[in-house]
């Protein structure tokens, strides 16, 4: 993978789900709501000074959110950060940089 360029969209993995789960409370706090479902379905990653993860998450019914999560370099020992997110997404919406 080239530094700076996002990867192609891939199916979510156990690691992707774990990343989404770790920022779920941050999203629920920002949106002031609890999501009945929180299942990562696909993702892209981007290597920067750490890694940005763009994750499409099913949150119930026909609703999806797109998350941008930053994972710092291991030696920095920082928690995952929910950098940005987009709500009101549908299953067919493309996961792109935001």
Image (cartoon, grey):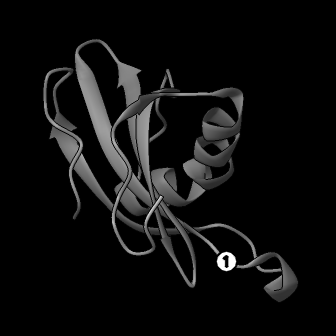
Could you tell whether 52 is left or right of 88 in the image? Answer: right
Could you tell whether 45 is left or right of 49 in the image? Answer: left
Q: How many numbered marks are there?
A: 1
> Which x, y percent locates residue 19?
64, 47
Q: Quadrant of the C terminus?
A: bottom left
Residue plotted at (67% across, 77% down): 72
Taking the view exactly as shown, the residue that stands out farthest to the front is 2
Q: Quadrant of residue 75?
A: bottom right
66 w.r.t. 73: above or below: above
Taking the view exactly as shown, the residue that stands out farthest to the top is 61
> Which x, y percent locates residue 18?
70, 39
> Which x, y percent locates residue 32?
41, 53
Residue under numbered circle 1: 72
- 34 or 69, which lies in front? 69
Q: Dot 1, crowdedness within 10 Å: few (<14), some or many (≥20)? A: some
39 w.r.t. 48: above or below: above
- 47 or 96, which lies in front? 47
> Which x, y percent locates residue 64?
29, 30
92 w.r.t. 97: above or below: above
Residue plotted at (82% across, 75% down): 74
Indicate the secondary structure of the residue bearing disc 1.
Answer: loop
Residue plotted at (33% across, 66% down): 5
Residue plotted at (31% across, 40% down): 65
């Amino acid at each position: 993978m080239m530094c700076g360029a996002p990867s192609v969209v891939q199916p979510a993995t156990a690691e992707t789900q774990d990343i989404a789960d770790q920022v779920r409370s941050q999203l629920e706090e920002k949106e002031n709501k609890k999501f009945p479902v929180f299942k990562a379905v696909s993702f892209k990653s981007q290597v920067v000074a750490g890694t940005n993860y763009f994750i499409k998450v099913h949150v119930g019914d026909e609703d999806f959110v797109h998350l941008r999560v930053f994972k710092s370099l291991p030696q920095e020992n920082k928690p995952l950060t929910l950098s940005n997110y987009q709500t009101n997404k549908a299953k067919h919406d493309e996961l792109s940089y935001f």
